[in-house]
Image (cartoon, rainbow, N blue to C red):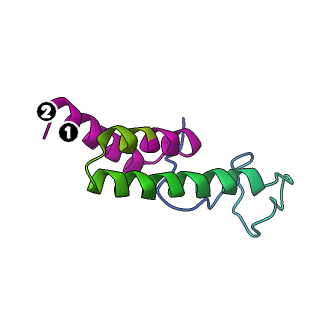
């Protein structure tokens, strides 16, 4: 059985062994290096902000591309909702 993972908040557990994070560099239990994971999270947030900006300016194609890139780096309910919203706007030309 899988436990619920909160992808909308910053990483609070090691993605490898699920130990609570006590340091931002590596897991105290298994030694997993968080650098790449945190970089992906940061990149996803950057693309998400850019997607919102392009959506605001009416560029749906670029907003969709950026939200897809954001989702590639880090999945979250907010990114999924944004992507679905953009797709619906494109579908109905609103």
Q: Any magenta on residue 89?
A: yes
| Residue positioned 34% across, 37% down in the render | 61
The one nearer the camera, 52 or 84, is 52
| Residue positioned 58% across, 44% down in the render | 73
In this image, 76 relative to 40: left or right? left
SS at badge 2:
helix
In this image, 33 relative to 64: left or right? right
Q: Position of residue 4 (x, y in %)?
A: 49, 47
For label 1, count other residues whose C-alpha is less than 10 Å away and answer few (under 14), some (14-19) or many (20+). few
Q: Quadrant of residue 72?
A: top right
Q: Position of residue 7 (x, y in %)?
A: 50, 52
Q: Quadrant of residue 52?
A: bottom left
Q: Compared to 72, does 48 lie above or below?
A: below
- Residue 21 is tagged as none
Mark 1, residue position: 89
- The secondary structure making up most of the magenta span is helix
SS at badge 1:
helix
Mark 2, residue position: 92
**Contact (CB < 8 A) between labels 1 and 2?**
yes
Q: Position of residue 90 (x, y in %)?
A: 22, 34
Location of the N terminus by quadrant is top right
The one nearer the camera, 72 or 7, is 72
Name of the residue lying farthest toward the right: 31
State the CA–CA distance, disc 1 to disc 2: 5 Å
Q: Compared to 63, does 23 lie above or below?
A: below
Q: Any magenta on residue 44?
A: no
Question: Which contiguous range is marked in magenta?
Answer: 66-94
For label 2, count other residues whose C-alpha is less than 10 Å away and answer few (under 14), some (14-19) or many (20+). few
Location of the C terminus by quadrant is top left
The one nearer the camera, 46 or 58, is 58
| Residue positioned 46% across, 48% down in the render | 76
């Amino acid at each position: 059985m899988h436990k619920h993972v909160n992808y909308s908040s910053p990483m609070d557990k090691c993605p490898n062994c699920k130990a609570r994070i006590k340091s931002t560099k590596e897991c105290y239990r298994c030694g997993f290096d968080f650098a790449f994971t945190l970089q992906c999270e940061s990149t996803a947030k950057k693309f998400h902000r850019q997607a919102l900006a392009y959506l605001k300016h009416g560029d749906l194609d670029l907003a969709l591309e950026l939200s897809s890139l954001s989702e590639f780096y880090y999945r979250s309910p907010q990114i999924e909702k944004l992507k679905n919203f953009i797709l619906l706007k494109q579908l109905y030309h609103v």
